[in-house]
Image (tube, rainbow, N blue to C red):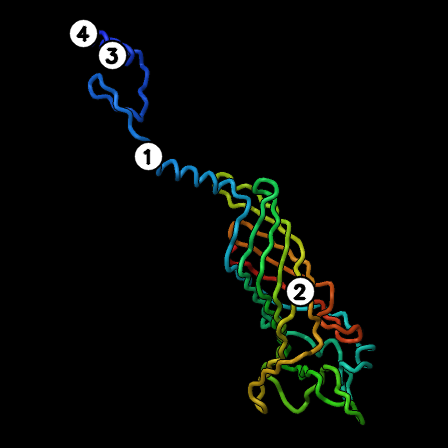
Amino acid sequence: MVLALVCFGLLANAQDDNGKKENPDTLRVGNIIIIKKSNPSKVNVTQKSEKKSKSKISTNWLVVDLGFSNFADHTNYAVANGGSYLQPGSTAFTKSDFNLRDGKSINVNIWLFMQQLYIIKKNVGLKYGLGVELNNYRFKKSSLLSFKEDGIPYAGTTQLNDPFVFRDTVVGFSKNKLALDYITVPMMLNFQTTPRHGKPKFNVAFGVSAGYLYSQRNKQVSAERGKKKNRGDYDAEKFKLSYVAELGLGYVKLYGSYSPNSMFESSTHLKFNPYTLGIRIGN
C-alpha cells in the first residue's frame, strides 16, 4: 500500500516536471486535487452580455432637437390677392409681408423615443420614433399680419367667412408669430460605420416623416393690446409629410426636414413649403 502511494506521488511530480499546467479551477494540497465549484454568477453575466451584444434593436429615450423653422414661399400673389384668404384692403400683399426673423423662428422637437432595428449587422438599420414637432414662425417687426379663423359673416349674408389673413394697421407688434405643432412619426434608413481604434462612428440617415397638426395659434404682443394668444383654425394643413435626414459624427448630429406640400390647405392660399435645420441631442 505504501509503495503504491509513493509511486502515485512520483508519477504526479513527473507530470508537473514535464510542464503541464493544471486547470485553474483546481487546487492541489499535497497529492490531493480539489476541484473548485464554478461560479454561477460569472456564467450568468457572460450569458447576459452575449445576449445583449446580439440584440437587433437599440432604443434612445427623450431625444431633443433644437433648430430653426422657415419656409420657402412659392405663393402666386396675383392669384392669392384675388381670393378670400388674403384681405389686403387698399394694398395687396407681397412676399415681403411674410418675411421672418430667422434667428427668432425656432424649431423644437421632443421625441419620446428613437429606435433602430438593425438590418445588416450594426451598419444598416431602420430608424423610427414618436414625438412632437413644434414650429414657431416669427414675423419681422414691420409685419402687421394677423391670422383669423372663421367667424365674420360675408357681406349681406349670415354665412360665416373662411379663415383669412389681414393687415392690422391700427397697432404695431413687438412680437408676432404663427405657431404650428404636430404629433410626428419619422422613419429613416440609417447607415453607420463601425468605430475603430477609438475613432467616432459616422452615420447618415434619410427618409420621411408624417405629422398630424394638433395646435395652431397666432401669438402677438403690442402696446395697444398687450399680450394676445389667438388659437383657432387658420386653414393650416392637418397632415404634414416631410423628407427628413440626419448627419452625425460621434455624439454630434445635424438634422433637417423639408415638406413638398404647403402648410396651408387651399390651392389659392399661401403656398409655404416648411423646412427645418438644427442639432439633435441625446441620440
CB atoms of marks 2 and 1 within 8 Å: no
Tag 1 or tag 3, which sits nearer the N-term? Answer: 3
Percent position (x, y) of residue 118?
A: 58, 45
Name the kind of residue labelled 4 in the image: Met
Position above or below: 91 against 254: below
Percent position (x, y) of residue 280?
A: 55, 58
**What residue sits 29% from the left and 12% below the top?**
15
| Pick the front one: 20 or 220 | 20
Tag 2 or tag 3, which sits nearer the N-term? Answer: 3
In front: label 3 or label 1: 1
Name the kind of residue labelled 2 in the image: Tyr
Q: Which residue is mark 1?
A: 39
Q: Which mark is residue 117?
A: none
CB atoms of marks 3 and 2 within 8 Å: no
Name the kind of residue labelled 1 in the image: Asn
Tag 4 or tag 3, which sits nearer the N-term? Answer: 4
**What residue sits 22% from the left and 16% below the top?**
31
In front: label 1 or label 4: 4
Direction top: furthest residue = 3
Percent position (x, y) of residue 273?
A: 71, 67
Direction front: furthest residue = 1
Q: Which residue is mark 4?
A: 1
| Pick the front one: 9 or 113 | 9
Q: Which residue is mark 2?
A: 275
Measured Cα–Cα span from mark 3 to mark 1: 29 Å
Q: Which residue is mark 3?
A: 13
Position above or below: 234 against 257: below
